[in-house]
Image (cartoon, helix red, strand yellow):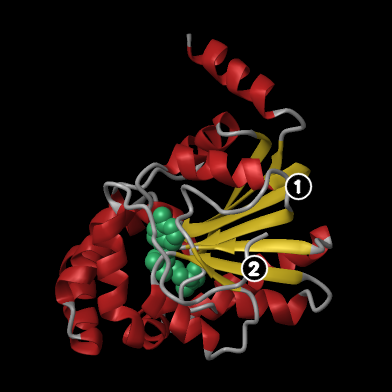
Amino acid sequence: MPADSTSPSPVPAPGKGPGVQRLFSTIASRYDIANHLLSAGLDFLWRRRAARIVRAWAPARILDLATGSGDLARTLARVCPGATIIGVDFCLPMLRIARRKHLPHLVQADALRLPFADATFDAVTIAFGLRNMESHERALAEMARVLRPGGQLLVLDFSAPTGLLRGIYRFYLRRILPRLAGLITGEKHAYEYLGSSIENFPHGEAMNAIIRASGFTTAACQALTGGIVSLYTATRAECLQSRRQQAISDNS
Ligand SMILES: C[S@@+](CC[C@H](N)C(=O)[O-])C[C@H]1O[C@@H](n2cnc3c(N)ncnc32)[C@H](O)[C@@H]1O
């Protein structure tokens, strides 16, 4: 494992990465307050729910990817007091906010090229981060690589609700959210991106299938708050190579 570092380090730039890095650098100082206001405080409940699931796995070493301002890592630290939690993000201004929350292990790195050896962690978590990544499959495969065989994955992210709520939610994402967020952060365009990223992000069974094809044996999804957020859990396959071969033959 590399030395903990929140000082600038050369981060290889993926196609979508630099734009996302810039976006989070711009909103970092107001990110937490915007989250809490725009979700009416529900984000605390979603992260607590996620952390309780992780606690039941009793992991000794947890990697919290796209840790950002560190809210999930901090919740994990509270509910899993014996675990070592490493928070990773490629955006330094976000990590600076996390550092103020007394998280001792923060590393600046790209989730698509993690600076950890194979099978380092018992659990990997990622909250509201996978959606922003250049390739969901590559990010998940990298998570599988650093998880030990039988280790656990938890992904928490926004999703599009179904039924009547879908149209209302789309209206909120397109018309209301950017305006509200613009007032809070002064960065309306950043939240226009948020809405479109949510609408385009695979969810439910489609996401379960992507997770399974990326090195995991099981994948389950729970819809929270009427489906505006989904929580995925999965178990890392015993052998990654055979999973890849199976995914290829399943698709042929
Ligand atoms: C919406 S924030 C989520 C922060 C935190 N997990 C939470 O629950 O509030 C998304 C974070 O993902 C990070 N991120 C996006 N792509 C990344 C990548 N390829 N590698 C590392 N971090 C990434 C961004 O810098 C940002 O801090």
Q: Amino acid at mark 1?
A: Gly
Is 35 or 2 nearer to us in this picture?
2
Q: CA distance from mark 2 to mark 1?
A: 16 Å
Q: Is residue 209 above or below residue 45?
A: above
Q: Position of residue 26 (x, y in %)?
A: 25, 78
Screen quadrant of the N terminus = bottom right
Badge 1 local density, few (<14 within 10 Å), some, or many (20+)?
Answer: many
Labelled disc at residue 86: 2
Badge 2 local density, few (<14 within 10 Å), some, or many (20+)?
Answer: many
Q: Which residue is mark 1?
A: 151
Location of residue 24 by image quarter: bottom left
Rendered-image quarter of ligand 1: bottom left
Lateral position of residue 231 relative to residue 136, left or right: right
Is 206 or 74 nearer to us in this picture?
74
Q: In the image, is the residue at mark 1 within 8 Å of ligand 1 by its beta carbon?
A: no
Q: In the image, is the residue at mark 2 within 8 Å of ligand 1 by its beta carbon?
A: no
Give the tally of numbered discs. Answer: 2
Is 167 or 23 nearer to us in this picture?
23
Q: Position of residue 15 (x, y in %)?
A: 27, 46
Q: Earlier in the sequence, mark 2 or mark 1?
A: 2
Labelled disc at residue 198: none
Lateral position of residue 143 relative to residue 193, left or right: right
Is any atom of residue 158 visible in this view?
no
Location of residue 33 by image quarter: bottom left
Q: Is residue 53 above or below residue 207?
A: below
Location of residue 240 by image quarter: top right
Residue at 71% x, 55% y is 123
Q: Secondary structure at mark 1?
A: strand
Q: Secondary structure at mark 2?
A: strand
Residue at 36% x, 55% y is 132
Q: Position of residue 214 (x, y in %)?
A: 56, 34
Q: Nearer the viewer, mark 2 or mark 1?
A: 2
